[in-house]
Amino acid sequence: MKIAVISPSKSHLQEMGNILQSNSHTAILIEGGKTKMRVVAEQKQPDLMLVDGMCCDPNELVQVEYVTTHYPKIAVILLCATQSPEFLINSMRAGVREVLPSPVSPEGLEAAVSRIAAKLVSTKTKGTGKILAFLPCKGGSGATFLATNLGYQLAETKSVLLIDLNLQFGDALSYVHEGTPASTLSDVAHDISRLDASFLAACTVKITASYSILAAPEDLTKAMEIKPEHVDAILAQAVTEYDFVLLDMSRTLDTLAIKALDRAYRIYPVLQAGLPGLRHASKLLAVFGSLGYPADKIELLVNRFEKGTDISLDSIQRSVGAVKLRTVPNSYKEVNTSINQGDALVEVTRSNAVSKNLAEFALSLSPRIEESRSLLDRLLRRA
């Protein structure tokens, strides 16, 4: 494990460095105080930061909270000569993992580092879910409907989390649920130091037993506080807890959106078969190319597609090149009814062409193992 040690005491640095290196850790020793934390986090990016020489002044925790908020993957342990109950509580609130005495005994340091290392290993060894990003090529393309309803169908056999990354005008929750959320994405970002499986789950709205949604902020001012590093940390946690993480995104390609798209297993731009949508799709594909995304990371969804329209599927394919296409049929009346009712389309009508199409889509992403055998195979086994 890569561990940065910050201390104003050369002797403390040397002692802790020897202990860490004897346990096969990489120790980065920095002489100084808490003001070094931000630079060390930015330049060294350790797994763990040990900060020695703290006192019981709550104002000292400002630097600590900056690191735990902006670099949530870095665990922080403080070493203090004196510890008051109030300081311990404030330290935990600032995102500190543990507070140890200073100077620390070899046994105490080894035990604390082992606890952090065990948690880090358990996080890395968990299963990794797939991130699927949906974004409209043009307003009104139907990306939110497809994302929320595909998520509902995937959740019949897999665990699914949908995160609404349309931070200013996101309303994905309303497509499959009535009511306002108790917590949103901004609440997770605000307390990012608390991020773990239970905190993430507690901030979501449970649609079914295996389908949850982390809603977009209700307050636009809070949406502005969400940073790319917050989204990155949330996605890193989410893929360890869910089989699929779906992102409902806006058309804005800022640093936050790109951070999310970088993590995506597949990106689904959604368009309708018209020239405006096709022009916007071409622009998006050009941006994705400049970002170095391979063609197989992207699949265009042509929504409300009908044969015999002015722009054929072949014309769309020629326009977008090697990118794969998937069509979703037009069923405006039933889809509109499901949206207005706040129910998944499959709950309104399972026999609808769009419901069947999304079921096939879900099956292609998560094939079910068929246990049934052919008649000949069963007869042979009986014989």
Image (cartoon, helix red, strand yellow):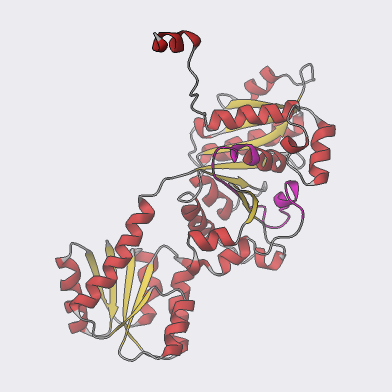
Q: What's the residue at 50%, 30% (across, down)?
A: 296
| Residue 310, horizontal then vertical, whole percent | 79, 20
Image spot of residue 315 (x, y percent): 69, 19
Residue 172: say if magenta. yes
Q: Nearer the viewer, residue 293 or 290?
A: 293
Residue 15 visible (yes or no) = yes
Q: Is residue 113 above or below residue 275?
A: below
Work out whether residue 82 or residue 220 is closer to the camera in this orientation and state it. 82
Residue in the picture at 74% in, 38% down? 347
Does residue 303 appear anywhere in the picture? no
- 273 sits to left or right of 267: right
Q: Find residue 368 and report its horizontal and vertical position in percent.
A: 52, 29
Q: Position of residue 318 (x, y in %)?
A: 63, 20
Residue 382: name its quadrant.
top left
Residues drawn in magenta: 152-178
Identify which residue, 127 or 103, lies in the foreground. 127
Work out which quarter of the rendered image holds the C terminus and state it.
top left
Using the image as rendered, state which of residue 114 and residue 10 is in the foreground.
114
Q: Quadrant of residue 313?
A: top right
Q: Quadrant of the N terminus?
A: bottom left
- Where is 283 relative to 40, above or below? above
Residue displayed at 64% across by 33% down:
282
The relative height of residue 22 versus residue 197 in the rendered view (above or below) is below
